[in-house]
């Protein structure tokens, strides 16, 4: 076939030109040398951290925790010296700052003066956080700054564990006291619970008592209203009777005046009767000369005496009846102890006047008989007259005595009624004040009734609250006892303290882990080595001069030639990887297939750029390599890139080459490798097609010339 003939001619000329052959052989070894150097190291990025100089400045002055001196700064420095995680250089502040300025240190760590003092505030209400200052010199090396930052974070975690351990130690030391306090509090709470039971019982009794008295309080309020109405009515009645009392006082004064006159009259009558008695003795002497006229006068006088005594007796009787009716009509009026004496005196006067009236009748009759029978019975009449006068004198003495009593009683009645009148006025004034007081009492009792209702409601709420307090105190007692039991049973051994100080221990596992750090960079190194080798190989092949053959044959020869050389590069590189470096590969066959496919794809890309642009195309290929170094997953995962760079990475072949190599080297995911291989084959198809189009166009524009195979 023409293609194989042309290809045989290409390789024959290559073998004949020793200089070109040597250059090609050298180019074939570029991926081997490149990969061998970069993948030969078995060290990791964290293997020699102790060589990174880091300045440490300890300004901590220490502090007193309880009775014990502490110096957390010295403890931290001691741990640094023991661990040697980094190249610690223990210097002062001046040397640290000077070393950073001269780029002698990658980082400076400064422990402040109050470092230990702030540790002592851990049990205080407002503890102060410790501040550990560190200054990084990122300009020396960015990755080194991240490594030192990771180291300082680990130091912070260890320091935090140390502080937590001190705190937990102090806390556990006080747990015994807390447990005792819980026990005492539980005992006190039990007493409190008993007290709340009594309180609940008392509030219950109070609520029942207050509620039961609500009706009585309401009755009291209603009763005081009725009292107010009654005192008002009483005041009105007293005011109405005030005139009658004044009339009674005036009448009693008049009665007293009448009794005085009556006393004087009875005294005169008594004196007259005594004179009559004396005259009766002389009657016999002068009866003959004076009897007729004297007896007639006597008869007339006794008649007037009869009429007057009858009227006086009737008046006395009416006085007694009036006093009795007044007493009955005013039973609430306290008339004093003399009122009954007045009534009794009036009754005696009435009785004496009745007797006088009766006697006066007999006297009148006797006087008439004397007058009528003087002539016939003078001597017997004078004797009877003398006897009658004796009796009349005796009765008159009684009348005079009764009149004296009546006058004294009337004086007392007048004085008493005067006092009654004054007392009545005072009573009206007192009842007025009583009415005002009753109004105030009524208003006050109404408020008491309203307040009592609120008191009943409050007592009910108080009872409910006391019940809740009782229930809460019982729960508190139970909780405190439980707390005392639990805190008393806490284990405060060193292992427990360490557990509280650092309760979480990370337990890590890795999948698809690398045996050496170089394994992680192998996908990137293999990709770069294959592409760089093919790019160098293209320097020794002329792609611009079209032969006097078909454009397809010319393209096929150049493509097969470059692909063959790229496959040889891949095989040499894989030989070094498997047998020289002995890199651990999860899918060796997948690595071989993917490396061969990737080398062919890269050869198509380089063929297109070199054929179309010559050295400019090769320069573009080199620029393409440089552009892909940081955005195709070599340094950072593509997912961590900005969105615009992620979008660009989707159109770059290194993205899929690195991902495919990673799938077969460390992930053992040949399916993912096939997916990336398929995308690379799209690059192969596009570049092959465009190269063929370019040769076709170039062939159509070039003049016919002899076939001259060049390398």
Image (cartoon, helix red, strand yellow):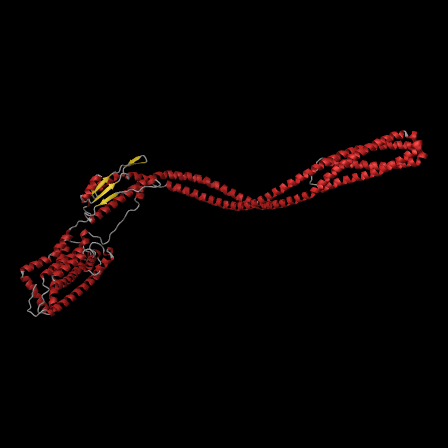
Q: In the rendered picture of this protein, how many numbered marks are placed on residues?
A: 0
**Quarter-of-image position of residue 583:** bottom left
For the N terminus, the quadrant is bottom left
Q: Is residue 402 visible?
A: no
Where residue 584 appears, as percent x and y from the top left, is 18, 54
Where residue 410 appears, as percent x and y from the top left, is 75, 35
Where residue 245 appears, as percent x and y from the top left, is 71, 40
Determine whether, in the image, residue 49 is placed left or right of residue 348. left
Where residue 396 appears, as percent x and y from the top left, is 83, 33
For the C terminus, the quadrant is bottom left
Residue nearer the viewer, 21 or 441? 441
Residue nearer the viewer, 538 or 407? 407
Identity of the residue drawn at 11% across and 58% down = 536
Determine whether, in the image, residue 657 is placed left or right of residue 545. right
Q: Is residue 155 visible?
A: yes
Determine whether, in the image, residue 303 is placed left or right of residue 329. right
Question: Of all residues shown, which one is farthest toward the right?
Answer: 376
**Quarter-of-image position of residue 598:** bottom left
């Amino acid at each position: 076939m023409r293609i194989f003939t042309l290809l045989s001619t290409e390789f024959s000329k290559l073998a004949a030109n020793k200089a070109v052959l040597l250059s090609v052989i050298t180019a074939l070894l570029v991926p081997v040398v490149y990969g061998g150097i970069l993948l030969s190291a078995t060290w990791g990025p964290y293997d020699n951290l102790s060589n990174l100089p880091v300045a440490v400045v300890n300004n901590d002055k220490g502090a007193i925790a309880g009775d014990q001196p502490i110096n957390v700064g010295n403890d931290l420095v001691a741990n640094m010296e023991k661990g040697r995680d980094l190249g610690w250089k223990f210097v002062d502040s001046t040397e640290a700052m000077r070393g950073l300025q001269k780029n002698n240190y990658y980082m400076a760590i400064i422990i402040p003066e109050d470092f230990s003092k702030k540790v002592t505030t851990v049990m205080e209400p407002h503890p102060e956080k410790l501040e550990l200052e560190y200054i990084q010199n990122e300009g020396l090396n960015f990755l080194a700054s991240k490594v030192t930052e990771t180291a300082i974070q680990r130091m912070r975690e260890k320091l935090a564990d140390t502080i937590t351990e001190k705190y937990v130690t102090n806390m556990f030391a006080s747990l015994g006291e807390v447990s005792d306090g819980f026990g005492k509090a539980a005992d006190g709470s039990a007493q409190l619970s008993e007290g709340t039971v009594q309180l609940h019982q008392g509030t219950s009794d109070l609520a029942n008592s207050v509620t039961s008295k609500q009706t009585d309080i309401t009755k009291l309020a209603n009763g005081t209203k009725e009292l107010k109405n009654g005192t008002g009515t009483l005041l009105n009645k007293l005011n109405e009777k005030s005139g009658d009392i004044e009339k009674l006082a005036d009448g009693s004064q008049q009665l007293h005046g009448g009794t005085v006159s009556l006393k004087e009259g009875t005294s005169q009558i008594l004196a007259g009767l005594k004179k009559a008695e004396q005259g009766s003795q002389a009657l016999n002497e002068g009866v003959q000369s004076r009897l007729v006229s004297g007896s007639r006068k006597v008869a007339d006088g006794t008649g007037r005496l009869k009429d007057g005594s009858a009227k006086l007796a009737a008046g006395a009787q009416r006085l007694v009846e009036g006093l009795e009716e007044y007493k009955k009509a005013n039973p609430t009026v306290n008339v004093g102890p003399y009122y009954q004496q007045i009534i009794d005196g009036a009754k005696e006067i009435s009785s004496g006047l009745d007797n006088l009236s009766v006697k006066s009748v007999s006297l009148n009759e006797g006087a008439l008989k004397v007058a009528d029978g003087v002539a016939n019975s003078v001597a017997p009449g004078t004797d009877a007259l003398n006897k009658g006068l004796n009796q009349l004198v005796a009765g008159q003495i009684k009348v005079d005595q009764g009149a004296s009593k009546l006058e004294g009683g009337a004086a007392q009645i007048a004085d008493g009624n005067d006092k009654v009148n004054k007392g009545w006025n005072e009573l009206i004034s007192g009842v007025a004040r009583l009415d005002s007081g009753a109004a105030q009492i009524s208003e006050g009792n109404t408020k008491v009734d309203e307040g009592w209702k609120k008191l009943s409601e409050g007592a009910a709420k108080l009872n409910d609250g006391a019940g809740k307090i009782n229930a809460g105190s019982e729960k508190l007692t139970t909780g405190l006892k439980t707390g005392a039991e639990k805190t008393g049973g806490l284990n405060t051994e060193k292992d427990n303290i360490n557990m509280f100080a650092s309760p979480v221990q990370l337990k890590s596992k890795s999948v698809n882990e690398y045996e050496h750090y170089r394994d992680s960079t192998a996908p990137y190194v293999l990709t770069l080595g294959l592409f760089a080798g093919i790019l160098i190989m293209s320097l020794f092949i002329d792609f611009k001069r079209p032969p006097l053959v078909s454009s397809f044959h010319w393209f096929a020869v150049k493509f097969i030639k470059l692909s063959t050389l790229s496959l040889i590069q891949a095989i040499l590189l894989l030989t070094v990887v498997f047998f020289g470096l002995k890199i651990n590969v999860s899918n060796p066959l997948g690595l071989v297939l993917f490396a061969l496919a990737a080398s062919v794809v890269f050869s198509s890309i380089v063929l297109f750029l070199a054929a179309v642009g010559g050295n400019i195309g090769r320069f573009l290929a080199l620029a393409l390599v440089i552009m892909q170094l940081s955005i195709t997953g070599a340094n950072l995962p593509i997912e961590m890139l900005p969105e615009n760079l992620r979008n660009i990475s989707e159109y770059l072949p290194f993205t899929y080459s690195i991902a495919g190599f990673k799938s077969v080297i460390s992930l053992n995911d040949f399916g993912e490798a096939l997916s990336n291989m398929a995308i690379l084959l799209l690059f192969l198809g596009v570049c092959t097609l465009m190269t063929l189009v370019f040769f076709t166009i170039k062939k159509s524009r070039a003049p016919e010339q002899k076939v001259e195979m060049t390398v």
